[in-house]
Amino acid sequence: MTQVLKREFIDAFKSVRSILILLFITYVSYQSAKFFDQNQDMINQFAEESGIGTGALYTAAIAFVVLIFGFLFVFAISHDLINREIEMKTIRLLVTKTSRIQIVLGKFLGVLLFWVVTISISFAIISLITGAWFLKDYVQTMIFLFYIISFVLFISTIISKTKLTMFIGIFLGIVLPIIGLIAVYSDKWYFIPFKYLLPYNYLEGSIVMTFIPLVIGVCFISISIMLLNRKDF
Amino acid sequence: MEMMNVKQLTKKYGSTNVLKGINLTIYQGEVFGFVGHNGAGKSTLIHILTDIVNKSGGSFEILGIPDQHMNQVKKRVGVMPDISNLYENMKGIDFLRYMGELSLANSSKEYYLSLMRDVGLEGAEWKKIKSYSFGMKKKISIAQALLGNPELIILDEPTSGLDPESAIEIRNMITELQKSGKTIFLTSHNLDEIEKICDRVGILSEGVIKKLGTPRELKIAANESKEAIGLIIRTKPVLTADHISQISDDLDINISFLHTKKDYTFLKVTSEDGLPQLSKKIMESGILLYEVKMEEQSLEEVFMNTKEE
């Protein structure tokens, strides 16, 4: 599994798209943290009036990027996480060397590690500027990304054409954040499934609620493993 | 010792039965060849045995491990599925390293370099696989199957599409592997090759193993089932139809004259029992007899007959 993980992780850094995304998130984090640091009075006043912690304000830029562009970015880098190997038939080599479950987990963890590094760089920059590490926001962001990566893994498992997952990825990357955010505030019956299946509703809840996307993510991974175990290559 | 034991293995694709109950045992140290026409199910069988495809029914054991626990045995089995399964954008050495690390094999650079040398890929280590020739791709595919010193090696058409020189190299490699104690299970369309390197052969047709045995056994069995035996006789002067009709009068077997070619006469006899008597008669008639040879069915004919059965 570690070899699949290592390869997926290294490959993520070789792609131009992922480097651009990493640079974009790092740049946004740096600029926003610098701006808030230079306007601390405004931050304190806003925090006091709104009841939001100052930490949440410093990390608001990362949260915004992940909430709005998270699906799009992860799909852009990893839409073909599983089906690329199936399409190129290289999965036939992999399954003769290691178990299918290890292939799925290795790939998932490789991508997750890429995002852990990317988000950690951004939080480290904020930490350098503010002198504090905003753990709650960090964990929440990582759980959100865990959900997205497991969802992308699931889509890449059920759809075998990489071109199709790229197209669907762009579509879902744009549509899901919109639906997800509307569903949080809407009582319409047709938004209810999205409210509970997408991770947006769980951001502003109790600590237990925060971990629900993690559980849904594990379900996506489990279904992906189950489907792949039954698949003929 | 049994290296592989397959029992009533079946595979269905929709309503099509590709494998209809395969029973097979492969023993330690043998080279087992599997032949069959296109679509007979050879690759499907290999794919099931190597976890590429799921079985529909039956069971199998590899190195004593049942198919439900196949992941435990993967490190001890080398598989060459197909050259189209390679990571084309990787350099040869990187590809072997990646595959080797998946197998938990020796991961030193020298090990991979020596393996590439062993399969005849010296000088191509740092080139991308997509720049390799067809033969080189076959070789690196075999090299990855040898990673981790496996006890059982499964090769899917290792020499198909290769020039004669490369095919001979790979055949020699297979023979060397057998000498070093490996068990090899391979499929091939090349019946000459199967005959040369395999200890036992299985002929797969319509999803079942129709014939199984050593190449010699299969040919003998095919000859025994024939109604007439082909006979080639070299004499001086060459035997004519008149000679044959004169000689055969006193014999217990029926002889039919077919044709002559140079010094050879081609006959058909109903039984081999009268051959000593026939030879004696020829010599007594003043004709010099140099050679009497029974026409054997080639493995190719055995295969073709199996297909028609």
Image (tube, rainbow, N blue to C red):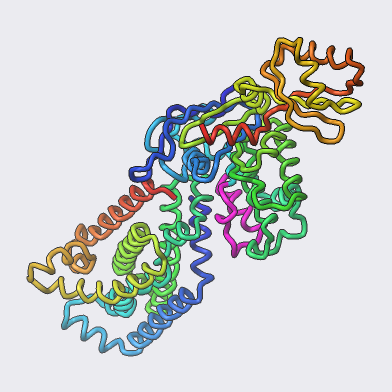
Residue B77, given in percent of the width and then of the height, sits at: 57, 38
Picture layout, residue B272 above or below residue A18:
above
Q: Locate residue A17 relative to residue A156 in the image: left or right.
A: right
Residue B86 located within the stretch drawn in magenta: yes
Instruction: Compare residues A227 and A153 and report the one nearer the observer.
Output: A227
Q: Quadrant of residue B250?
A: top right
Q: Which one is nearer the viewer's eye here, B169 or B282?
A: B282
Q: Is residue B104 left or right of residue A129?
A: right
* Res. B70 in view: yes
x 82%, y 27%: residue: B240
Out of B84 and B21, give the one closest to the viewer: B21
Question: Do we see residue A135 in this rendering?
Answer: no
Instruction: Indicate whether residue B217 is drawn in magenta.
Output: no
Q: Position of residue A1 (x, y in %)?
A: 48, 50
Which residue occupies 52% across, 55% down?
A90
In the figure, residue B297 lies in which quadrant? Answer: top right
Height in image: B178 above or below A212?
above
Residue A7 is situated, as x and y percent measured from the top left of the image, at: 53, 59
Q: Is residue B240 above or below residue B189?
A: above
Count of numbered badges drawn on the protein: 0
In the image, the segment drawn in magenta is B81-104
Left or right: residue A8 compared with residue B34: left
Location of residue A60 in the rendering, given as x and y in whole percent from the top left corner: 29, 78
